Image: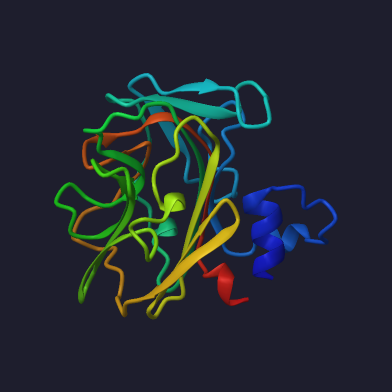
Amino acid sequence: LFATVLAVALFGMGCASVNVTKEQLQNGLIAYYPFSGNAMDASGNGNHGEALEGAKLTVDRHGETDRAYLFDGIKSHIHIKGSKKIEPPHGFTVSLWYYNLESREDAWAGFIAKNGPGQAAGFRLWTQVSRRIFLTVWGKNGVLNTTLGPDEHSENLFLIDKKWTQLVFTFDGVKKWSFYQNGIFVETLEREIEVSWNPGYPINLNIGMSHRSFFEGMLDDIRFYDRDLSTE
């Protein structure tokens, strides 16, 4: 099912011939932001976002107006109030499309993050000065902080400028963390970790920022599943 659901629902690369039902696309979908004129959650779970500090609608990768959000890299982001509905107890999958506008060498930027001010729980997907893409996960038994990919010289593991690019990571709920870029498998890391979602305060979900580091560019089609699609 991974090849079909991710190809159609996530990668969206000419997979119309693949037979995927609506039920398959919805199964385990706990938050979905297609940005169709707003920052509302289209999964039906009510995890609606609020565009803040100048985040504004723009043209998406298909050329349709008001179907993606543009972020200024200074303060703009989308805020989703902390909800237990987006704190999966076991495995999960996160997918997003990004278009990076700036190639600043000193830039730290967050794509998406669900973690508190003290960064004691949750996760963040981000990039920093080296322009490599990182995933950080806070667990009850340690912290996973890894670059996306096994080879530091591999070109497809760095932030790509001025081109729509898709990122996916999945967690099997035990120890396998798998990464994909533009529909291509990058690697699977093995790190046994129990994700911590409860630091004693609500953990908000933010799009376009992570711990005061803001993304400059466009983001679209963000999906959050409460299961590891790659295991099916």
- Tell me: 13 left or right of 75: right
Q: Is residue 40 left or right of residue 160?
A: right
Q: Is residue 149 left or right of residue 184?
A: left
For the residue pair 11 and 105, the one nearer the viewer reads as: 105
Residue 84's place in the image compared with 196, above or below, is above
Colouring method of the image:
rainbow
Q: Provide residue 120's location: percent of width, then percent of height.
A: 18, 59
Q: Residue 61 versus residue 52: which sits nearer the camera? A: 61
Residue 26 visible somewhere in the drawing: no
Residue at the image position 21 percent from the left and 33 percent from the top: 106
**Residue at the spot x=58%, y=59% of the render?**
184
Question: Which quadrant of the figure contains the C terminus?
Answer: bottom right
The percent coordinates of residue 94 (x first, y second) are: 48, 56
Residue 119 horizontal/vertical position (percent): 18, 54
Q: Is residue 51 above or below residue 140?
A: above
Which of the 4 image quadrants contains residue 28?
bottom right
Where residue 3 sits, quadrant-wise, is: bottom right
**Up/down of 115 relative to 151, above or below:** above
Q: Quadrant of the N terminus?
A: bottom right
How many dots with numbers? 0
Picture coordinates of residue 75, whole percent (x, y): 28, 25
Whether residue 218 sits left or right of residue 131 in the image: it is: right
The structure residue drawn at horizontal position 22% and vertical position 50%, both measured from the top left corner, is 116
